[in-house]
Image (cartoon, rainbow, N blue to C red):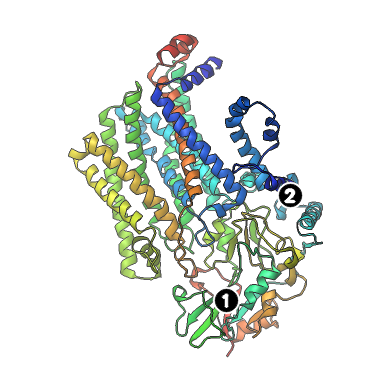
Amino acid sequence: MRHKKSSESGSSPGNRPPTDLENSSIKKTNSELLDRRTFMAGAASVLGMFAVSSCSWQEFIQNNFQRMTKEEIEQTVERLRKEYKEKYGKDFVVGTEGPLEATLFGYALDIQRCIGCRKCVYACVEENNQSRDPQIQYIRVLRFKDGDMDLEHSTIYYDPEEVPEDGYYYMPVQCQHCANAPCTKVCPVRATWTERDGIVVVDYNWCIGCRYCMAACPYMGRWFNFAEPVIPAESINTVTHYLGNRPRMKNVVEKCTFCIQRVRVGKYPACVEVCPVGARKFGNLLDPDSEISKIIRNKRVFRLKSELNTQPKFYYFFAT
Amino acid sequence: MKSFIVQAVKRILVGPPLYYAWMTLLLIFVAIGIGSYIQQLKVGLIATGMTSYVSWGFYLGNFTFLVGVAAAAVLLIIPAYLYDFGPIKDIVIVGEILAVSALLMCMMFVTADLGRPDRIWHLIPGIGILNLPSSLLSWDIVVLNGYLFLNLLIPGYIIYKAYNEKPVNYNFLLPFILLSIPWAVSIHTVTAFIYNGLAARPFWNASILAPRFLASAFCSGPALIILLFQIVRHYTKFHVKDEALHKIAEMIAVAMAINLFLLGAEFFKELYSDTHHLSPLKYLYAGMDGKGRLVPWIWTAFTFNVIAFFIFLIPFTRKRFLTLNLGCVLIIIGIWIEKGMGLIIPGFIPAPLGEVWEYAPTTLEILVTLGIWSLGLLILTINLKIVLPIETGEFTKHTASNGALASGRA
């Protein structure tokens, strides 16, 4: 972090941050300085890459989460907690809970009940520490005219006095946690994968930012931090998971994790909890007595773009 | 070896005023490009026009075009080595050197597009993870590097022998030459498959994509080569026969005919079946929801390609340098639009949930792109400056040891 801060507070007139090398050359004569300018441009580009895009040496050499030993995970978590404390002035929990036994998470959303209030959208942003500037939201609530389910005719831009509106219905879309996920398949470095409990996760410290997964996703389930994420310290959620809602860095991909930090300790995802009409259902697909299993067995369900054979674990259903 | 390096450096540093002007111009653009890239690293990819809707843009457009240029060297290799066509065999080395520069530009464009270039080591098998066999991007890294190796090895060996004034052992070289032919096809096929394999993007998810990639590559690459050969023979003692250029032009005519035919086939399928898969094509050629930033560009490309096709088809215009060069320029611009922005952007429009969000590169993106092109041309110029005198026999072990003599003539 120190590197980053010093570069921001520097008074360099150019686009690049001042480097130690450059500062020392200020004492030299002007002609020497000019001679060195071309060299400096090259040196600055190399040093600049470290100064602006990485925070620490430990972060730079950090391994893929799946390949880390227990000790490495503990050390990394400690480092991250220190980093977050420095940045937000708060003590963080960075959980590393693994998948639960005999559990495969699934989700169901009742289209008939959804009123399009977008409470889920904002609860998700707060729970999962999405950047407020630029804004990232994992859930997009589509509005359709009655009698039409054509995505190209839908819109996310509706702003009435009151919802629901006459003549419309709503369909929230987020990561569908596909069993045959096109996004994890294309990642050139295996920075994203499906956990044993069915949650599709991203290792933010392993992602190289190529955005191939975003091109591969048919649901717009993945979002990119085009700039350093900004979250006010007073609204940061300090209860996090390594593969979930811990603060992200710029130029990496993130996505819905079914609130991995909550569901692995027996809580519901934030969007399920906040829904005022109970349209959102969540549970264990492997348990035949769970609510989600009963819905899939007994209700009329469908999965979005099922013709693509992505096999989402996210179902839409009609309760009545 | 030492005398070779000293002589080579001398050859790079010495040249006519026009050479200095050219190199200075390139260096200025490279410097501006590096400055802009540092700014991009500092603020993040928000400095570009890309969004979560259109998540790839100008960089990958240029990358795709240049993979085609690199692959096109094969159109010289086949007649030169397999059919032993003399006029092209004499000059094939320039095509291979162009391929090397194009490949290096490709790698620079992909790196510029990466959000985290500091983590590029994650791609190195062993210390990192290269996701084979499932990621096509990983495959592309393998084939591009393999092709780079072949295109360094083959001309490198020939030049090494020429420098030492020894005959080339073609029996040693033949396996590599034979390998480089399917390999050239593979780099453009795998690059096409990067896009082709994504069911989420119907515009790319059509089997015609890879064949069209190859057809258009065999137009733009050779067109660049024809122009390059004329520049080379004008400014150096390197001899290029008209016959060779006309043979390449003939191949362009065939490639363009196939390219336009495949475009027609694509149009028919989408227009006649009239499903939602038509939407990206509609956005590209006619605009959608009142948005159509690419429409003038793609019609320019279409017009240029059709005019160029007739120029290359008719022997009268193909064999006159005025019209031939006009055709080359039209093709290069036409394919650059078609295989660049015209291919990448409509893949993302409309977005998977139906929104139409447009994209345009920012000034910074354009400056970085200019910087990469300039660096590529700089590498090409330097390579040619060393290789061509070796090929013509002006620069050998013998002349290098009489250093003063050699540099006096350069």
Seen as rendered, the residue at the extreme front is: A30
Establish if B127 lies above or below B152.
below
The percent position of residue B392, horizontal first and vertical second, equals 38, 19
Instruction: Please identify, in this view, whether the residue under mark 1 or under mark 2 is nearer the observer.
Output: 2
- Residue A165 relative to residue B84: left or right: right
The percent position of residue A147, horizontal first and vertical second, equals 45, 85
Establish if B61 lies above or below A262.
above
Q: Do the residues labelled 1 and 2 touch (CB within 8 Å)?
A: no
The percent position of residue A226, horizontal first and vertical second, equals 59, 56
Image mark count = 2
The percent position of residue B154, horizontal first and vertical second, equals 46, 30
The amino acid sitting under disc 2 is Met
Mark 1 and mark 2: span between their CA atoms?
A: 37 Å
**Label 2, on which residue?**
A1
**Label 1, on which residue?**
A172
Give the chain letter at badge 2: A
**Foreground of the two, A90 or A271:** A90
- Residue B329 relative to residue A151: left or right: left
- Residue A126 relative to residue B273: left or right: right
Q: Is mark 1 on a helix, strand or loop?
A: strand
Which tag, 1 or 2, sits closer to the chain's start? 2
Splitting the image into 4 quarters, where does residue B387 fall? top left
The amino acid sitting under disc 1 is Pro
Give the chain letter at badge 1: A
Establish if A312 lies above or below B225.
below
Q: Residues within 10 Å of mark 1 (few under 14, many from 20)?
A: some
Q: What element carries label 2?
A: loop
- Residue A50 badge: none
